[in-house]
Image (spheres, helix red, strand yellow):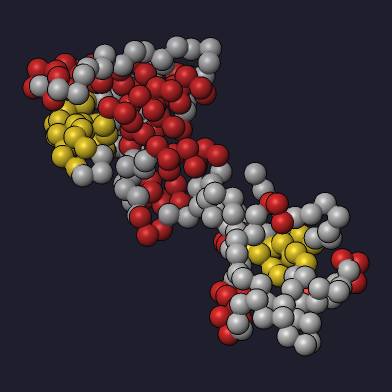
């Protein structure tokens, strides 16, 4: 008696149930349910339903093209002007086009082996979440917890790799204007943490320094020679080439 190996066919990905959303921050857009029911070993979960919008499908196509430049992903359905995007006929045609796109993608073994595709199809992780996982900012442990939760992410448990803690000490010449850079003591330095740096690349001094500033009159130049300048932001222009700076990082620097 000859036993034949049973091969489980690829699932039929369904794109259905379009819903048009009206939001204050993102305006008006339509999302679609991506439903998969399968026993194929390439898929992590037997049954999932994930809601995505057209821009996320476009993001997926770009990711596949970047990861596999030797292949050209199938085309997405064409875009339309804002007013036409929400016609029932247009939404129906777009839904059919998106379904065809996904079924064509999973039929390609090269794409089927890409974790980005599976996270897109079977989890509710955002494009940013998936990109962070690929780049190493989102931990493998967290992704495994998402799979165990049936593809549903837990917002309060998102764990991204923390950046290295960087401490920079710069000479605090307000302690004694007569001190030279070569003989500055530990008390003559002001520390700046990475958490004090804003998105523009500027940095503000710590709250303790601010409290000390408020306790002294501005511009006070007393007999002891101590000067209390007005508190200001520290920028790259304050780092003079001739000065001595120390950089301390317990965890090291990472990309």
Residue furthest to the right in view is: 182
Rendered location of residue 58, percent (x, y): 35, 24
Q: Is residue 129 left or right of residue 17?
A: right
Question: Residue 25: where, in percent of width, then height?
Answer: 25, 44
Left/right placement of residue 214 relative to residue 221 reads left
Image coordinates of residue 155 in percent, x first then y, are 35, 55
Q: Image point 75% across, 55% down: which residue? A: 239
Whether residue 69 sits left or right of residue 8 in the image: it is: right
Which quadrant does the C terminus fall into? top right
Q: Which residue is situated farthest in the left direction here? A: 88
* Residue 31 locus on image (x, y percent): 21, 33
Front one among 216 and 98? 216
Q: Nearer the viewer, residue 137 or 168?
A: 168
User: How many marks on residues?
Assistant: 0
- Image point (60%, 64%), residue name: 232
Q: Is residue 100 visible?
A: no
Image quarter of residue 18:
top left
Q: Quadrant of the N terminus?
A: top left
Is any atom of residue 184 visible in this view?
Answer: yes
Identify the residue shown where x is 44% and y is 48%: 144
The image shows residue 251, relative to residue 209, as above or below, that is above
Q: Residue furthest bottom?
A: 223
Residue at the image point whose x is 69% and y is 51% from the top = 236
Q: In the figure, residue 45 lies in which quadrant?
A: top left
Along the line of sight, which residue is nearer the eye, 129 or 116? 129
């Amino acid at each position: 008696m000859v036993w034949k190996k049973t091969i489980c066919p690829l699932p039929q990905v369904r794109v259905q149930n379009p819903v048009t959303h009206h939001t204050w921050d993102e305006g008006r857009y339509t999302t679609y349910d991506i439903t998969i029911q399968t026993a194929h070993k390439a898929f992590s979960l037997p049954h999932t339903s994930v809601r995505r919008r057209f821009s996320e499908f476009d993001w997926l196509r770009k990711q596949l093209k970047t990861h596999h430049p030797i292949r050209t992903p199938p085309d997405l359905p064409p875009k339309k002007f804002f007013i036409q995007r929400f016609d029932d006929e247009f939404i129906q045609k777009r839904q059919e086009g998106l379904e065809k796109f996904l079924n064509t993608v999973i039929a390609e073994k090269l794409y089927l082996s890409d974790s980005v595709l599976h996270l897109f199809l079977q989890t509710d992780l955002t494009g940013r979440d998936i990109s962070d996982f690929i780049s190493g900012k989102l931990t493998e442990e967290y992704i495994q917890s998402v799979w165990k939760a049936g593809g549903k992410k837990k917002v309060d448990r998102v764990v991204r790799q923390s950046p290295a803690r960087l401490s920079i000490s710069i000479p605090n010449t307000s302690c004694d204007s007569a001190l030279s850079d070569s003989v500055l003591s530990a008390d003559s330095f002001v520390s700046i943490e990475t958490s004090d740096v804003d998105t523009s690349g500027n940095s503000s001094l710590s709250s303790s320094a601010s409290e000390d500033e408020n306790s002294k009159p501005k511009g006070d130049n007393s007999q002891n020679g101590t000067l209390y300048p007005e508190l200001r932001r520290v920028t790259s222009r304050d780092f003079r080439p001739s000065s001595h700076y120390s950089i301390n990082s317990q965890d090291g620097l990472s990309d």
